[in-house]
Amino acid sequence: MKILITGGAGFIGSHVVRRFVLNYPQYEIINLDKLTYAGNLENLQDIESKENYRFIKGDIVDREFIDGLFEREQFDCVIHLAAESHVDRSISNPLEFVYTNVVGTVNLIHAFKTHRKNPEGFFYHVSTDEVYGELSDEGKFTETTPYSPNSPYSASKASSDHFVRAYHETYGLPVKLSNCSNNYGSHHFPEKLIPLFINNIRNRKPLPVYGTGDNVRDWLFVEDHAAAIDVIFHKGGAGETYNIGGNNEWKNIDLVRLMCKLMDQKLGRPEGDSEKLITFVKDRAGHDFRYAIDSSKLMNELGWEPSLQFEEGLSKTIDWYFENEQWLEHVTSGAYLEYYKQQYEQR
Ligand code: NAD
Ligand code: DAU
């Protein structure tokens, strides 16, 4: 089976690519990624020479390129993760999110529909819980919660979800969707809360907590998300949506305090030392108050469950950043962008 994974050089995509390449040597895995600021081939160095793996640099927004690629390669299935993913960037530059997340997704699914030969093949769209909007103190998002996106990022993801479902309803194309909560783990770009704050605590830089810090997020270890994608890919029903969450809600401020505590212990700093770095700053515009996910459909029907307790996962994540200083240094300095040139330009 030939599987196209898009966005495989990003945070979640690199975990998904690695899992599929290593666990399924019988599959041919092609990773298509534009290598934006968020795409980093250093994330995949350990598997880049595997026989069942290939990387293609390309933009999902480029219709001609995508159409030619699908015509040539005849993929059996697509797992689509490529996206602009950062809410704060979407507030300053919404159009980029429309191009990649909406136009890019439609280009891909249209080319898949046009050139598909395998009637068993399907298009798997990876999405976010942010499409459901925000919750107050009570309740959880289920698969039937109405869409109510609040940020340009979540509006673009909601739109892409609707297009994927429309291709199923209108053209009978087999599709699968999943909507996941906040991921954390290794290879996370240090613009997002957890990796940014790990880096800042380490370097004794201020920790900019938006608003009051009372906003709530549900956190899931990235490898558990990749495992859920694996299960849905293999066992999920066509036309179905699955919510994926960690059942692990944290107020931002409590999470930041936990990170400070763990890092003080690891760095041998006095208790309470890093908390002094916490700085409350102007809130994010349209900041969703709370996300919480009900994953019972995925758990009951497909038998998935999260594998790690949060403190353990967070501790592993912090250790990974300590052990991979060079990765962080390359990412923060932009040096990782040179990697593609060195590794791939001559091939
Ligand atoms: P990321 O920003 O780390 O990675 C995105 C990847 O997509 C990068 O490798 C980038 O180079 C690539 N890309 C961007 N624009 C492209 C284009 N035009 N053509 C080809 N490739 C392009 O994102 P992530 O956090 O790994 O998220 C991956 C997917 O999972 C996204 O669809 C996101 O909406 C979804 N998601 C993320 C989370 C989370 O907590 N990070 C949670 C739920 C769902
Ligand atoms: O819920 C899933 C979503 O989770 C994904 O779809 C997105 O791609 C992913 O980026 C993430 O979105 P969030 O906006 O929740 O993640 P972020 O790490 O940017 O912020 C987490 C919380 O921390 C949020 O309430 C905003 C707050 N925050 C964030 C940053 C970067 C701060 O207080 N300070 C910060 O500097």
Image (cartoon, helix red, strand yellow):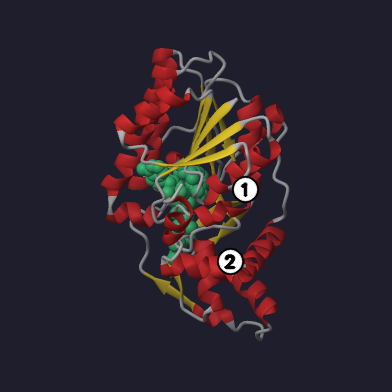
Q: Nearer the viewer, residue 135 or 303?
A: 303
Furthest residue in direction front, as rendered: 346
Sequence order check, earlier mark of 1 and 2: 1
Give how far across and how far down residue 3 sits, in percent: 55, 30
Q: Nearer the viewer, mark 1 or mark 2?
A: 1
* Element on which disc 1 rests: helix
Say above or below: 29 vs 37.
above
Give how far across and how far down residue 38 sits, in percent: 43, 54
Q: Is residue 316 left or right of residue 168?
A: right
Q: Which label belongs to residue 30? A: none
The structure residue drawn at horizontal position 50% and vertical position 48%, both measured from the top left corner, is 9
Q: Which residue is mark 1?
A: 47
Rounded to the nearest angstrom, the CA distance separating label 1 from label 2 is 37 Å
The structure residue drawn at horizontal position 60% and vertical position 46%, both measured from the top left corner, is 49
Q: Amino acid at mark 2?
A: Asp
Furthest residue in direction bottom, as rendered: 270
The structure residue drawn at horizontal position 69% and vertical position 83%, both measured from the top left corner, is 268
Q: Amino acid at mark 1?
A: Ile
Say above or below: 230 vs 269.
above
Q: Which residue is mark 2?
A: 254
Residue 247 visible in the picture: no
Q: Nearer the viewer, residue 264 or 82?
A: 82
